[in-house]
Amino acid sequence: RRAKATSARTSARSAGGIPAGRGSGSCACSSPPRRIAASANASSADATASTAEDDTIKVGAGQRGSLEERLAAALAEDTSLPTNPNPLALPELPDLRELATIAALEVSDAEVADWTPKVHGILSWFGKLNEVDLSAVRSEGALYRDAWVMPLRGDDPVDFANRDAMFAECKTWQKPFVKVPKVDVKESDAAAAATAAVDGEDAASASTLAVPAAAATGNTVAIAVADDVAELPLTPELLGMEFKVGRVLAVRLHPDADKLFIEEVDCGEEGGPRTICSGLVPYMSPEDIMGKNVVVLANLKARSMAGVQSAGMLLCASNGLDGDARVVELLMAPEGAAVGERLTWGGAANEMPHGANKVAKKKIWEKVQPGLVTTDGCAASWNGTPLVSAAGAVTCTSLKGGSIS
C-alpha cells in the first residue's frame, strides 16, 4: 500500500505542475503526506485516498490517546475469564487531598483535579481483577521459573578454630553475640532487668574478693562498703565514664573569676598535664589541693571557664547544704594508686570510654551522677558499688552520705 501511495503521489505531483524529481524523497519519508487538490482524475483520487489511509496508519501507530481515554478503553474491554464467585467488597476510591494531608504533601486544586480521575481510573482497572476468577489464569504448562532454583553450594558449616580466643580479645563481643547500642528505652530497661541476676552474682564475687584484699592492705574503708556492693546493677552509661587518678602539680587562682582555681593535673597522658578549672575557692585552700591524688572525670567535653579551657573535672563530695553550712571535700585515691590509672566500680571491667561529644549530647554524666554518694565509711560509691583503684577504695576525708559531683 505504501508503494502504491508513493506512485500515486508522484503522478499527482506531475498532474499538479510539481516536478516529480524535486523533493519527492522528503515528501515520502520525512514530511507528513499532503492531500493535493489537483484536477479530477482517477490517479489523483487514488493518491488522496491512499494518502489519507497512510495518515491514519501513522497516527494509530505513533500516537497514543490520553490516559483517561486509554483507561476508559481498558475498563470497557471484556474478558474471556470466568466471573469471580466470591468477589471482595472494594473500598471507596481515595480522596487525593486527604491522602496528601496524611503524607504531609502540599497539592494545589489544579493538581487534585488533574490527578484524581487518573488515579481513580488506575485503581478501578486493578479493581476489575476482583471481578474475574484468577485461578483460571494459571496455565497447565510449566514455566521457566517453576523449575528454576538458586544455584547455591551445599551448606557445610565450618567451625572457626580460634573463635573463643577472638571473643575473649574483642571488647565489642559478648559471648556469641555482637554488642549493639540500645536505641529503645523499654528495650534497655528489659535488658537490664534480664541481666540483673548475672550482674549481681558477678558483683557479689567482686565483693568477696574485696574484703580480703582490704584486710591485707589495712584499708578498712573497703571493708566498710563491701556489704552494700551491687544493690543495683552497673550500667553501660556508668562503665563508659572515664574516672582517672590524677596528681595535682600546681594550683593558682583564676585571674578573672574569684571562685575558681586553675589546677595543672598529671593524668599520665602523653599530651602532658591537664588544665582544669574548679570552683573550690570558697571551700578549701590551694594547699588542700596541691600534691593530692585526685579523681578526674576525663571524658567530659572541654569548655571555657572565664576564658580558660578546662579539660575535665575534679570530683568532690558535699553535704548538700547551702551558704556557710556547705562542706566540700576532694575525693582522693590511695597513696599507692598509679597516676593515670582508670578506676573501676567494685573491680568490674570498664567499657570503652564514651566520646566527649556523646557524653554531652546524650547527657550521660547527668544520668549517672545522682547515684554517686559517699558511704558511712566515707568511700565513693554508685548505688552501693565502691569506686576503687588497684591500691584500694577512693575516699573523702569525713563526709558520710554526701553527694558526689
Image (cartoon, rainbow, N blue to C red):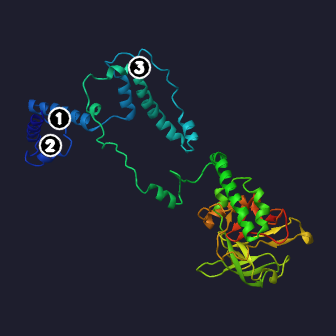
The one of 313 and 45 positioned closer to us in this rendering:
313
Q: Is residue 399 above or below residue 117?
A: below
Q: Residue at x 28, y 35 (%)?
A: 148
- The residue that label 1 is drawn on is 51
Nearer to us: label 1 or label 3: 3
Q: Quadrant of the C terminus?
A: bottom right
Quadrant in the rendering for residue 376: bottom right
Secondary structure, mark 2, is: helix
Q: Give the answer, above or below, for where 125 lies relative to 308.
A: above
Q: Which residue is mark 3?
A: 131
Secondary structure beneath dot 3 equals helix
Earlier residue among tags 1 and 2: 2
Instruction: Report the residue at 38% width, 25% height from top.
Output: 75
- Answer with mark 1 or mark 3, whichever residue precedes in sequence: 1
Frontmost of labels 2 and 3 is 3
Q: Amino acid at mark 3?
A: Glu
Q: Amino acid at mark 1?
A: Thr
Q: Residue at x 75, y 79 (%)?
A: 292
Q: Which residue is mark 2?
A: 28
- In the rendered image, residue 219, in percent from the top left (x then y), is placed at 76, 69
Seen in the image, is 237 located left or right of residue 96?
right
Residue 165 vs 152, above or below: the answer is: below
Q: Image quadrant for the N terminus? A: top left
Q: Residues within 10 Å of mark 3 (few under 14, many from 20)?
A: some
Q: Quadrant of residue 327?
A: bottom right
The reply to whether callout 2 and callout 3 are in contact (CB within 8 Å) is: no
Is label 1 in contact with label 3 (beta carbons under 8 Å)? no
Marks 1 and 3, how far apart in space?
44 Å
* Picture disc at residue 221: none
Mark 1 is surrounded, within 10 Å at the Cα level, by few (under 14), some (14 to 19) or many (20 or more) other residues, namely many
